[in-house]
């Protein structure tokens, strides 16, 4: 049996994931995923990056999709995954600081939420770790009544510029934390 997904908001990002996370494959990394939905990015990370026995993935989502755990079970790596059910700002604040190798920001797309995920995520990532923002250029008039990711990501990039190496800016933004 294969994975069961309704939506695909991930596949076109795979080249960037491979480019930046390839070197982390088969290493005992700690990863946080904000926004897991049905587990499409989750299962890809488990299959392709969190391949080391001691790798761990914290997922944060305020709504548990029915398909999430069955999809994660299919990876055979269920034991590596913990789901924190709730708002991302609360989930992130509950996590230890400066230990994560990668934080994927793909939860709420409203500006204030993305900014808070960026700031809290930055603090959780260790020096040398990576943060990626999905949907940098997303701006859907049907759902953007409280803004969109770009102003938040731009503010974060500007204010933290001396602490970041910018790796990619396109539909996604990828940065490396270079200092605390
Ligand atoms: C675009 S989907 C994530 C897609 C997934 N990363 C993938 O590639 O398949 C966004 C997810 O974020 C969750 N979400 C939205 N706002 C949130 C918030 N403030 N805190 C936690 N989760 C949130 C939604 O429930 C949804 O499952």
Image (tube, rainbow, N blue to C red):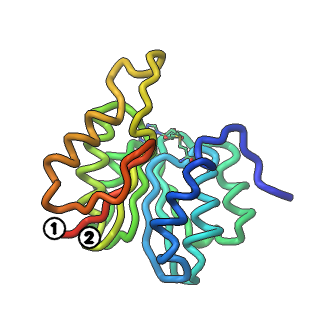
Numbered label tally: 2
Q: Residue furthest right?
A: 1
Q: Is residue 138 left or right of residue 50?
A: left
Question: In which quadrant will I find the C terminus?
Answer: bottom left
Residue 97: numbered disc: none
Residue 76 image point, x, y percent: 71, 71
Q: Is residue 82 left or right of residue 74?
A: left
Mark 2–mark 1 distance (CA, rounded to whole Å)? 8 Å
Q: Are marks 2 and 1 in contact (CB under 8 Å)?
A: yes
Element type where label 1 sits in the image: loop
The first of marks 2 and 1 along the sequence is: 2
Closer to the camera, 15 or 62?
15
In this rendering, the answer to whether 155 lies above or below 123 is above
Residue at 65% x, 68% y: name it. Answer: 47
Question: In which quadrant will I find the N terminus?
Answer: bottom right
Closer to the camera, 164 or 123?
164
Residue at 39% x, 39% y: name it. Answer: 136
Element type where label 2 sits in the image: loop
Residue 89 image point, x, y percent: 31, 46
Disc 2 C-beta below 8 A from ligand 1: no
Residue under label 2: 98
Residue under label 1: 180
In this rendering, the answer to whether 140 lies above or below 105 is above
Residue 139 image point, x, y percent: 42, 26
Q: Is residue 148 left or right of residue 79?
A: left
Around disc 2, counting alpha carbons within 10 Å, would you say few (fewer than 14), some (14 to 19), or many (20 or more)?
some
């Amino acid at each position: 049996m294969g994975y069961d997904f309704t939506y695909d908001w991930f596949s076109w990002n795979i080249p960037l994931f491979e480019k930046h996370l390839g070197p982390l494959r088969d290493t005992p990394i700690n990863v946080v995923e904000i926004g897991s939905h049905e587990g499409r990015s989750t299962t890809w990370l488990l299959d392709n990056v969190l391949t080391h026995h001691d790798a761990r993935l914290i997922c944060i989502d305020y709504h548990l999709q029915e398909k999430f755990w069955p999809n994660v079970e299919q990876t055979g790596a269920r034991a590596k995954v913990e789901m924190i059910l709730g708002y991302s700002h609360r989930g992130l604040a509950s996590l230890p600081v400066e230990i994560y190798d990668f934080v994927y920001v793909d939860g709420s797309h409203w500006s204030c939420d993305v900014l808070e995920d960026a700031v809290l995520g930055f603090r959780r990532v260790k020096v040398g770790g990576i943060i990626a923002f999905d949907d940098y250029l997303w701006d859907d008039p049907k759902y953007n009544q409280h803004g969109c990711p770009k102003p938040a990501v731009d503010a974060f990039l500007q204010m933290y510029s001396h602490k970041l190496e910018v790796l990619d800016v396109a539909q996604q933004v990828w940065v490396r934390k270079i200092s605390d």
